[in-house]
Image (cartoon, rainbow, N blue to C red):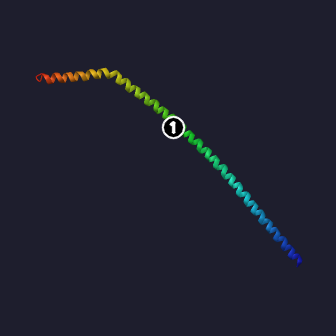
Amino acid sequence: MEGIINTLSEFENNVENLNSNIEELKKRMLSYSNSEIEQLRQKIIKLANEEAERILNDAKKESALIQEQGEKNYNQIKNNIEKNYDKAIDKVISMILGNIDNESNPNKT
């Protein structure tokens, strides 16, 4: 009977040791999982930042091209206005003078 009690006591000690080992393994696995999660989180943040930077740089390049095209269009319009400014003034003056002449002489057709 004493042998059975000793065997049961030894078995109980082994179960307690196993439970203790299992708890320790759970803690290690949890710690390892948290560490892996943090590393993955950092990698995702890094990749997201790199992608955001790439998108921002592409947008800056596109913006610069749009600005350059806008400046070209502005300069072209400005040059056209400057080229035709004198003609426009002459035409307006002619129209005004023509209207004045027509108003002062209604028989003139």
Q: Dot 1, how many residues are within 10 Å of its Cα: few (below 14), some (14-19), or many (20+)?
A: few
Counting from the top left corner in percent of width and height, residue 74 is at 40, 28
For residue 9, say whether it is visible. Answer: yes
- Above or below for 17 versus 67: below
Task: Please state, as top left, top right, bottom left or bottom right, where the N terminus lies in the image.
Answer: bottom right
* SS at circle 1: helix
Height in image: 8 above or below 22? below
Q: How far across and down, in percent of the image, does residue 89 sit?
A: 28, 22
Q: In this view, does 7 lie above or below 24?
A: below
Q: Which of 18 and 99 is in front in this view?
A: 99
Residue 80: x, y in percent?
A: 36, 24
In the shown orientation, is residue 50 left or right of residue 75?
Answer: right
Residue lying furthest right: 2
In the displayed structure, 100 sits above or below 4; it is above
Residue 96 is left or right of residue 81, and the answer is left
Question: What residue is drawn where x is 48% and y is 35%?
Answer: 63
Tell me which residue sits at (44%, 30%) in the image: 69
Residue at 57% over, 42% down: 51
Q: Which of 98 and 54 is in front in this view?
A: 98
Marker count (numbered): 1
Classify the position of the C terminus by image quarter.
top left
Q: Identify the image quadrant of residue 101.
A: top left
Residue tagged 1:
59
Measured from the top left, where is residue 4 in percent x and y?
A: 86, 76
**Is there any visible trace of residue 109 in the rendered image?**
no
Q: Which of 104 and 107 is in front in this view?
A: 104
Q: Is residue 49 left or right of residue 26?
A: left
Kind of residue at disc 1: Ala
